[in-house]
Image: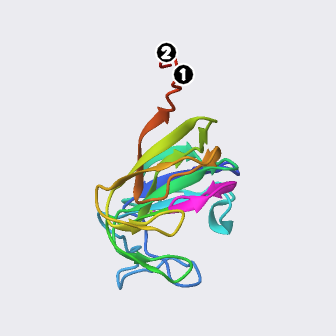
Amino acid sequence: MIKLGQYQYCEIKNPVVRDKEGNIVFDKFGQAKVNQGDSEYRNGDNALYSEPFPLHPNEQLIKILDIETIPRDCFGKIVSLREFTDASGKKRFAGDEWLIEGPKTYIPRVEERLDQIIKPIIIELNCALRLRARRACVDYHGVERKDKEEWLIRTPGFYIPKIDEEVVDIVKALTITETKIA
């Protein structure tokens, strides 16, 4: 029997097939049908798995992990592993990347993975953030950028790079006086 806590999930390899109501589908010989070679995540918030549950024949427990949280003022970078339609009805393809804003509890799906949590970068006075476009995109200020183009963000405060931007460096201003360059 497997018991999941409220903020835990597990990965099951070769899960049984379930119908729309959550009932197990059986073949003509009375054996539970299995999605051979596939995986699924089960979490304690789901009514089917809030109580201890057994593994059916051919199912394998891969791991039990804690559900991750995306902190306030941070973003989670999600990468699609295969084609699927997400909860909002948007079609995602393998390799697609997008951001989800925190604070949020991230409940994983087999079709996607949380690649990283992006924390805000603090741009101090007399500094600038140097960014590079990973591919053609529109930046934070609505300016169209070409692939590999670089630019500076000089506005002091928090900045979170968009999905098509990568941080190259933080550039500090040079102070020039009559006697020295600092």
Residue 110 location (% of width, % of height): 43, 62
Name the amino acid type tagged 2: Lys
Q: Residue at point 54% right, 21% down?
A: 177
Q: Residue at point 32% right, 68% down?
A: 94
Give the colour scheme shown.
rainbow
Q: Residue furthest front?
A: 178
Q: Are marks 2 and 1 in contact (CB under 8 Å)?
A: yes
Name the amino acid type tagged 1: Thr
Q: CA distance from mark 2 to mark 1?
A: 5 Å
Give the total of numbered labels: 2
Horizontal placement of 128 versus 48: left or right? left
Whether residue 68 appears in magenta in the rendering, the answer is: no
Q: Which residues are magenta?
A: 99-109
Residue nearest the viewer, comparing 139 with 73: 139
Residue identifier under label 2 = 180
Residue identifier under label 1 = 177
Whether residue 108 appears in magenta in the rendering, the answer is: yes
